[in-house]
Amino acid sequence: MADVEKGAPVPAAAPAEGRHAASGGRSASVVGAALRRWRTQDPLERSGSALRAGAWALSLLAFLVMACNEHGDWKQFDRYEEYRYIVAVGLLAFVYTTLQLLRHGVRLTGGQDLQPKTGLLVDFAGDQVTAYLLMSALSATIPITNRMREGADNVFTDSSAASISMAFFAFVCLALSALISGFKLTKQTCI
């Protein structure tokens, strides 16, 4: 097997290392090639992917915590449109970051990606739009949660606050990722 980036052959893993060709030698070599490319990748590319992975986990947590926030009577998230909005935006952010991480995985394994300039535009615009949607959902849910906490501090309001804080940290990750993708976009030539 040849390393596509360097044009040099890559030595195969020896059977003495505990890997058998019939039991997944191909998948181990694909993972090894992806790890080698990850290490040799541009630090900006790695940090953008790491920030998107953080946003992926945090938006999933924000979505799940709020979606499971049902404690009977008035303590159900779906009775409040602000909370339904943060659930929808958290799910959207999760789907977006999942697709971006899959794109990055395809690039690491040597697959075809979008044209370089188009890919950078998609990264920049997608990160910005998703980050702004997260901030919009935060600004809608914080006032209602504060009003509820003044009257009664309970599991429902604590779960709402936890979901809001996870969405805020997901916003921070995506905002930093948008800065990085904007910087990479400015380094591209116009031709």
Image: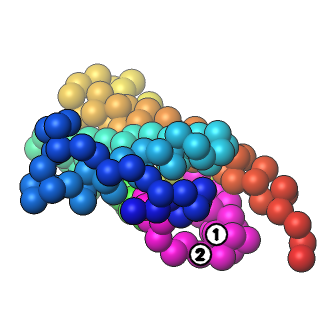
Residues drawn in magenta: 102-131
- Residue 69: image quadrant is top left
**Would residue 178 be found to the left or right of residue 161 on screen?**
right
Q: Residue at x 45, y 40 (%)?
A: 54
Work out which residue is located at the far right of the displayed protein and give it. Answer: 190
Q: Residue at x 24, y 59 (%)?
A: 26
- Residue placed most toward the observer, 132 or 137: 132
- Residue 99: image quadrant is bottom left
x, y (%) of residue 118?
Answer: 68, 74
Q: Residue at x 88, y 66 (%)?
A: 189
Q: CA distance from mark 2 to mark 1?
A: 5 Å
The residue singled out by tag 2 in the image is: 114
Q: Report the label total.
A: 2
**Would residue 53 be found to the left or right of residue 65 on screen?**
right
The residue singled out by tag 1 in the image is: 119
Residue type pointed to by label 2: Leu
